[in-house]
Image (tube, coloured by chain):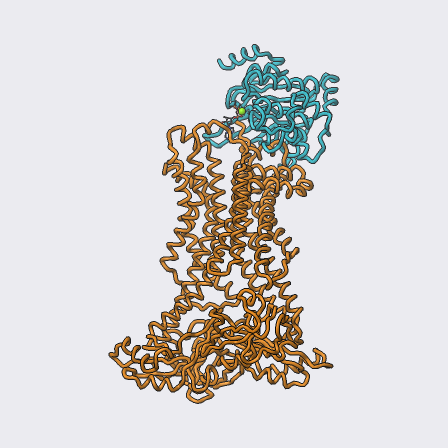
């Protein structure tokens, strides 16, 4: 049931009723027991649509990372369900989840995204080589072109700046044409200019190639790049903004802060 | 700071425990050896003390000759015994015989000869002061055909008074009536030894010569000044002809002689203990290096908040000392247990060791603890100093992949050390005198250290080559494994070095053994003309009475018989074993490859010399060779120069010459050629029938004769393999330890790989392949060393070993076993890596 990005795009622009690529239904995740119980996710229901760039916002400890982790099959739920591309993740074992991550999901973490022993190119095609698949050369070259790393392909991560490293991470997340890319504070460690570059690439991938991206961020400026912003507080979705911009996000955050 | 040390010890307890095991095993081996030799020493010391307990004086002939554990001393006449007995102050004197014999077991097998672990034949002395034996049941031997044995033998061999006992005396079986059983001092019998006592006349006939004793034992009158008595006896017998010692002196000398023999044994085992400890140092060095590197940030932080260099250095050093103390103590305990295992192992190779409670000397305890601490602390000094040198700034810097290792200085130092080591090794082989062995050892050590220094330089390229097939087959996992193995060349090289030492030694002796076997095969193949050889099947002394050769010669089916024997002698001032053969016929059965003269011309008053010895000592045809026997000395003229590996002594005389100068005659091998027209298959049963009476005689054809020699080589080989297993095990612990630390260090990376889709299986495979690559690096380096060292030794052993043979199957097997062991060592770390929780590992928040 692989769906090419082109097909997704047709679907996105061709049909008015958009189809969700991934999502959660009544997702509950608790840590600890009794007095010490923490409800990191407290009944979250959300869908992420194909070709959408979604930002997840919220105060520290509100459950943003937890939500991403359960959506990506890195962690399991206490109750409720999450799905990616029509598959309920709770039905998959570790091996199947690993394959799902490898073939259908892209990742960008805040830092330490790259394998230090592999060079830039090897890092970009890593999920495909792990699967024993040949990379789609044209697509990979296009991705490399977008992130502007063509002259750095033979370099090791330790020889790159933080911004360059994050660009490699973006390229890797896109290279295997995943159904969805999860990014957890991808610009958290970058200065504003470099961060803006990385965000621009992400948005380009969404606009031009119909890539679906879900990004956790604290930064209202970063949220401004997204098509939709979701606000989490204490493990619950409290608000949603469409076509957010920096100012609207800041406004909304202020209101949330007052609550 | 002390608190920090304790915390670190606790935090890294599993790693340090594994490291400790490397020390524990080495220390255990050492302590085990010490306990074993001390135990043996005490058992044998007690034997000599018991023997001489009531003896005030021992009188014997001076200047025995001896070499390689064989010795010969002129005997004393019965008349001398009477003479001594008559001296004032002597209460009683008795001739004493302590001769070689062999017990023929009830199943027809023969006990080994020799006085340790063998059978000793003595004369029964009626005076309790002069006889350590006490009759326990039955009675002392009186008649000529009576024998008494020690109680321990009676129990272990299942004899009963009234039964017959067969002894092999002078190479001839003799059956005697068992009339009594005796205890030996406090013991049931001398440890590991069979004792057979007969009356004087029988003892002379069976274990000595008629009318002669080995020595005279004296009990002094009460109140006699022993020192004065020594002088009196010396004067009475004539100075120079006799050696008079007090009982205590005789005991001390025998103990000294034995300690020297045990010293060899001790050194042999100690060498393996040292190898194990040496391998252990690599492991400790490596573990502490990695720990220090992993703690760089923490150390830098401590420096930043005010800890000084010395405090950091001391923290690491005391951590290692603590590991050393614990490891030393455990090693000591294990060593005591191990001494029993060593005993069994040495016993399996043919060296019987008597039983007895383990002797744990204070020296052993001190040595175990100080070696444990010493080795650990010394190995950790480098890493500790590095910990001290951490600068506060390092706290802020991320630890990048280590790219260092291939510096020019390192390359040059490494090459200089390797070349110097090889030179010392070669020098030690060429030199023959004292210290040549230590030169060989130092050469080996320096070569290994040279390789160790060079390791980080060559690790990367060598692993790239080794990894080629792996990355072809293993894909990304293979590539990742290769990259991981080369990311820290120092660490990889140090880990592999430990295995390298083991592989080098195993490979070295394997090549040496194969080369020797091929050379022996060829030498015997080329020179053996006999159809049959009668052998004893035992190493060392003993053999057949000369009348066996006569009986064989009398067989019409046998055309030629030439017997071979040897005796200790002093040749040109050197202790040696002099060979003797029937020179008249030896050429018909064995080609000595005579270069000058003729072997038949070696008769009374002449000698043949092996070419290598003649060349070395500048001896030519017609020159005289001075030979001193136990009883007399002669000058023999060189009548032939030959070039053969057998006989091994290098000097050969005719049997007649030997008989003229040596009291006891045994044939140790009898070569035979069958008469023309006879077939070997037909003659064999006839010969077998003739030798049946001689229970120690074994018939061999050419193939069996060769096999027997090579079997001896194999037995030693197996023992050395067994002893080296420990070093290899320690090396494997090192690999496991390094990998565990590396996996720990790469937690985030592994988490990342898992997040982007690496399966658990792939994670496991990556670690296992890395482990295998490290092992293969050790194999590659070790094999190079083995080839070089073995080649050097073989060259040095020429012409005795004149083929350099690298057995391909064995060498491949060593490589395969080491690689498999490498994978095995990686199993634990691989499993741990695959079980890492992805979220914990990435620790994204
Ligand atoms: N492994 C865990 N064990 C216990 N509690 C946890 C665990 N992981 C997360 N939590 C708790 O769950 C809640 C949500 O955590 P989460 O990491 O999702 O927050 P976040 O929104 O990503 O915060 P931040 O913006 O700081 O990254 C927090 O209260 C956190 O303390
Ligand atoms: Mg978070």
Q: Is residue B101 above or below residue A39?
A: below
Lateral position of residue B501 relative to residue B224, left or right: right
Determine whether B442 is above or below B393 in the image.
below
| x, y percent for residue B286 | 49, 42
Is residue B756 at least partly visible in the picture?
Answer: yes
In the figure, residue B204 lies in which quadrant? bottom left
Image coords of residue A136 (percent x, y): 72, 28
Chain represented in cyan: A
The percent coordinates of residue B827 (x first, y second) are: 57, 45
Of residues B456 and B577, the one drawn nearer to the viewer in this rendering: B577
Q: Is residue B42 left or right of residue A190?
A: left
Q: Residue at x 58, y 83 (%)?
A: B548
The picture quadrant for ligand 2 comes to top right
Looking at this view, is B235 or B812 the one in front? B235
Residue at the image point whose x is 39% and y is 73% from the top: B187
Quadrant in the picture for the N terminus of chain A: top right
Residue B322 appears left or right of A133: left
Q: Is residue B153 visible?
A: no
Query: What letter labels the chain drawn in orange?
Result: B
Quadrant housing residue B513:
bottom right
Give the total of numbered labels: 0
């Amino acid at each position: 049931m692989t769906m090419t990005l082109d097909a997704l795009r047709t679907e996105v622009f061709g049909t008015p009723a958009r189809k969700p690529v991934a999502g959660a239904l009544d997702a509950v995740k608790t840590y600890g027991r009794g007095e010490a119980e923490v409800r990191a996710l407290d009944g979250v229901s959300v869908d992420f649509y194909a070709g959408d760039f979604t930002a997840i916002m919220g105060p520290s400890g509100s459950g943003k990372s937890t939500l991403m982790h359960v959506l990506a099959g890195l962690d399991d739920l206490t109750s409720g369900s999450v799905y990616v591309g029509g598959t309920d993740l709770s039905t998959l074992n570790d091996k199947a989840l690993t394959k799902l991550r490898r073939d259908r999901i892209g990742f960008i973490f805040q830092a330490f995204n790259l394998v230090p022993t592999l060079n830039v190119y090897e890092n970009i095609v890593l999920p495909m080589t792990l699967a024993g698949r040949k990379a789609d050369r044209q697509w990979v070259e296009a991705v490399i072109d977008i992130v502007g790393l063509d002259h750095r392909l033979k370099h090791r991560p330790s020889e790159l700046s933080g911004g360059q490293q994050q660009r490699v991470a973006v390229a890797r997340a896109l290279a295997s044409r995943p159904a969805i890319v999860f990014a957890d504070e991808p610009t958290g460690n970058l200065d504003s200019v470099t961060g803006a570059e990385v965000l621009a690439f992400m948005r380009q991938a969404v606009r031009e190639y119909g890539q679906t991206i879900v990004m956790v961020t604290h930064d209202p400026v970063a949220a401004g790049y997204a098509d939709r912003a979701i606000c989490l507080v204490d493990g619950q979705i409290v608000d949603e903004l469409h076509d957010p911009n920096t100012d609207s996000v800041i406004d909304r955050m202020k209101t949330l802060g007052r609550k | 700071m002390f608190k920090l040390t304790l915390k670190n010890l606790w935090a890294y307890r599993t790693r340090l425990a594994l490291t400790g095991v490397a020390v524990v095993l080495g220390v255990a081996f050492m302590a085990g050896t010490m306990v074993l030799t001390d135990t043996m020493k005490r058992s044998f010391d007690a034997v000599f003390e018991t023997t001489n307990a009531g003896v005030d004086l021992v009188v014997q002939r001076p200047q025995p000759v001896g070499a390689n554990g064989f010795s010969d001393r002129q005997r004393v006449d019965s008349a001398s015994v009477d003479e001594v007995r008559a001296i004032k102050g002597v209460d009683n004197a008795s001739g004493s015989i302590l001769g070689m014999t062999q017990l023929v077991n009830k199943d027809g097998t023969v006990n080994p000869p020799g006085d340790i672990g063998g059978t000793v034949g003595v004369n029964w002395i009626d005076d309790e002061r002069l006889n350590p034996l006490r009759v326990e049941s039955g009675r002392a031997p009186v008649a000529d055909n009576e024998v008494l044995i020690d109680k321990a033998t009676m129990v272990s061999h299942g004899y009963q008074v009234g039964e017959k006992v067969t002894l092999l005396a002078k190479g001839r079986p003799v059956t005697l009536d068992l009339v009594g059983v005796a205890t030996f001092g406090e013991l049931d019998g001398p440890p590991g030894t069979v004792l057979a006592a007969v009356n004087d006349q029988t003892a002379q006939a069976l274990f000595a010569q008629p009318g002669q004793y080995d020595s005279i034992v004296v009990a002094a009158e009460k109140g006699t000044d022993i020192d004065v008595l020594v002088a009196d006896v010396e004067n009475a017998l004539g100075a120079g002809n006799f050696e008079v010692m007090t009982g205590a002196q005789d005991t001390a000398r025998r103990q000294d002689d034995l300690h020297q023999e045990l010293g060899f044994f001790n050194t042999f085992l100690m060498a393996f203990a040292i190898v194990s400890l040496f391998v252990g140092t690599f492991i400790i060095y490596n573990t502490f290096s990695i720990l220090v590197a992993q703690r760089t940030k923490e150390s830098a932080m401590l420096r930043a908040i005010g800890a000084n260099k010395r405090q950091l250095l001391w923290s690491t050093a005391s951590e290692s000392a603590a590991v050393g103390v614990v490891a030393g103590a455990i090693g000591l305990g294990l060593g005591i247990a191990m001494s029993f295992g060593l005993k069994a192992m040495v016993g399996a190779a043919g060296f019987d060791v008597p039983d007895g409670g383990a002797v744990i000397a204070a020296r052993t305890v001190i040595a175990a603890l100080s070696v444990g601490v010493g080795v650990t602390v010394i190995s950790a000094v480098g890493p500790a100093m590095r910990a001290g040198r951490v600068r506060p700034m390092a706290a802020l810097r991320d630890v990048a992949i280590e790219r260092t290792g291939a510096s020019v200085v390192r390359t040059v130092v490494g090459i200089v050390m390797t070349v110097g080591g090889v030179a010392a090794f070669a020098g030690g082989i060429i030199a023959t005198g004292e210290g040549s062995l230590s030169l060989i050892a130092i050469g080996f050590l320096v070569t290994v250290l040279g390789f160790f220094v060079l390791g980080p330089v060559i690790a990367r390229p060598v692993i790239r080559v080794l990894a080629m097939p792996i990355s072809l087959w293993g894909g990304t996992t293979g590539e990742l494994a290769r990259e991981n193995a080369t990311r820290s060349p120092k660490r990889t090289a140090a880990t592999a070095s430990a295995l390298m030492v083991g592989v080098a030694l195993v490979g070295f002796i394997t090549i040496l053994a194969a080369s020797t076997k091929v050379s022996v095969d060829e030498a015997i193949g080329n020179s053996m003309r006999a159809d049959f050889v009668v052998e004893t099947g035992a190493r060392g002394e003993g053999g057949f009475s000369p009348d066996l050769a006569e009986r064989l010669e009398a067989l019409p089916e046998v055309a030629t018989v030439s017997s071979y024997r040897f005796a200790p002698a002093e040749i040109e001032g050197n202790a040696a074993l002099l060979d003797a053969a029937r020179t008249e016929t030896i050429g018909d059965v064995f080609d000595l490859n005579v270069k000058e003269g003729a072997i038949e011309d070696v008769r009374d008053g002449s000698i043949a010399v092996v070419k290598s010895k003649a060349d070395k000592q500048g001896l030519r045809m017609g020159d005289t060779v001075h030979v001193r026997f136990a009883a007399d000395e002669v000058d023999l003229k060189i009548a032939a120069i030959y070039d053969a590996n057998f006989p091994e002594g290098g000097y050969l005389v005719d049997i007649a010459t030997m008989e003229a100068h040596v009291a006891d005659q045994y044939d140790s091998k009898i070569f035979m050629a069958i008469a023309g027209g006879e077939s070997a298959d037909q003659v064999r049963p006839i010969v077998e029938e003739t030798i049946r009476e001689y229970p120690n005689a074994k018939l061999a054809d050419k193939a069996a004769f060769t096999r027997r020699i090579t079997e001896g080589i194999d037995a030693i080989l197996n023992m050395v393999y067994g002893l080296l297993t420990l070093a290899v095990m320690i090396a494997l612990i090192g690999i496991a330890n390094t990998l565990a630390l590396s996996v720990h260090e790469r937690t985030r990376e592994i988490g990342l790989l898992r997040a982007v889709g690496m399966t658990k299986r792939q994670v496991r495979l990556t670690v296992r392949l890395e482990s295998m690559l490290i092992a293969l690096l050790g194999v590659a380096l070790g094999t190079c060393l083995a080839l070089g060292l073995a080649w050097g030794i073989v060259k040095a052993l020429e012409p005795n070993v004149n083929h350099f043979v690298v057995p391909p199957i064995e060498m491949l097997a060593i490589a395969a076993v080491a690689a498999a062991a490498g994978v095995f060592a990686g199993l634990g770390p691989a499993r741990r890596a695959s079980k890492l929780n992805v979220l914990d590992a990435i620790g994204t928040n």
